[in-house]
Amino acid sequence: MKFTIDHKSPVPLHAQVEELLRELIEQDEYQKGKVLPSEVEISNRLAISRSTVRQAIKKLVFEGLLIRKKKAGTKVAPKPVSSKSNNWLSFSQEMKLRGIPIKNFELHLSWVKPLDDVARFFEISNDKNVLKMERVRGKPDEPFVYFVSYFHPRIGLTGEEDFKLPLYEMLEQEHSIIASLSKEEISATASDEFISKKLEIKKGTPVLFRKRFVFDQGERSIEYNLGYYKSDSFIYSVESSR
């Protein structure tokens, strides 16, 4: 890209620099973490004052697009993963649509006696075994969510299924179970020692806690899901229309 501005333009210099930086930070090399040129380098190349450059950079820092650290320079701020509630999908499908590569850090399956909340949701007794799935997932370089799912025995899961596939696609294709309704509860909590270890964060760090109750087309319960998300890596947005 051209690294120039128009000194004769009626558009203020700081606004031109701001626009130039917006284009610059969209380049792949800066999205991957390369440090941006320094204030001195930019001011020299554009023949303007450092204060003008600083004004433009501060605007982008304020917008959350850039991060400045002493001695480390200025970098593009990492984009948090976002989830929209108006069109829920399995986690794999959601991230695929957003072009976010996902890595499975852990996957554990076990047969357990349901906790009271799970038994009430499934309307079964506490002595009935249910399949429990635990997963730690995230971007290739860091985990950002720990999931725990319990599945209704009615589904007929054996534990031999390929849970690396998108969950709701697998349930539909292999067990003719169509997940059609999700009810959710979202709150903030502090990570305990267990969650902190799973997400590689300090104990007491704020996390987003989400309960998801999933039903089939007949509004019968099929999954009880708990999710713990790193608060600095995930945004949950709600879109409503009237």
Image (tube, rainbow, N blue to C red):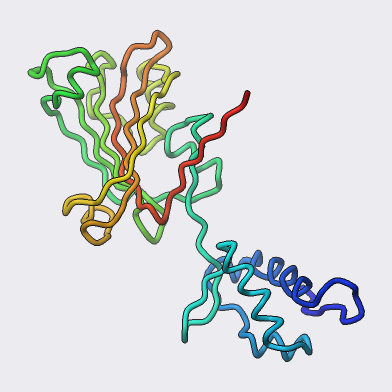
Query: With 55 as the anchor, is 69 left or right in this view?
Result: left
In this rendering, is residue 70 above or below 142?
A: below
| Image coordinates for residue 58, horizontal then vertical, percent | 61, 73
Residue sitting at 17 percent across and 13 percent down?
124
> In the depicted view, which residue is nearer to us: 191 or 37?
191
Indicate the quadrant containing the N terminus: top left, top right, bottom left or bottom right: bottom right
Number of callouts: 0
| Image coordinates for residue 140, horizontal then vertical, percent | 41, 57
| Image coordinates for residue 188, horizontal then vertical, percent | 32, 44
As drawn, the residue found furthest toward the left would be 127
In this rendering, is residue 95 above or below 68?
A: above
Q: Quadrant of residue 30?
A: bottom right
Q: Quadrant of residue 61?
A: bottom right
> In the depicted view, which residue is nearer to us: 3 or 104?
3
| Image coordinates for residue 31, horizontal then vertical, percent | 57, 66
Residue sitting at 47 percent across and 31 percent down?
89
Residue sitting at 23 percent across and 56 percent down?
204
Indicate the quadrant containing the C terminus: top left, top right, bottom left or bottom right: top right
In this rendering, is residue 91 above or below 115?
A: below
Query: With 196 as the anchor, is 145 left or right in this view?
Result: right
As drawn, the residue found furthest toward the top would be 218
Residue sitting at 12 percent across and 14 percent down?
125
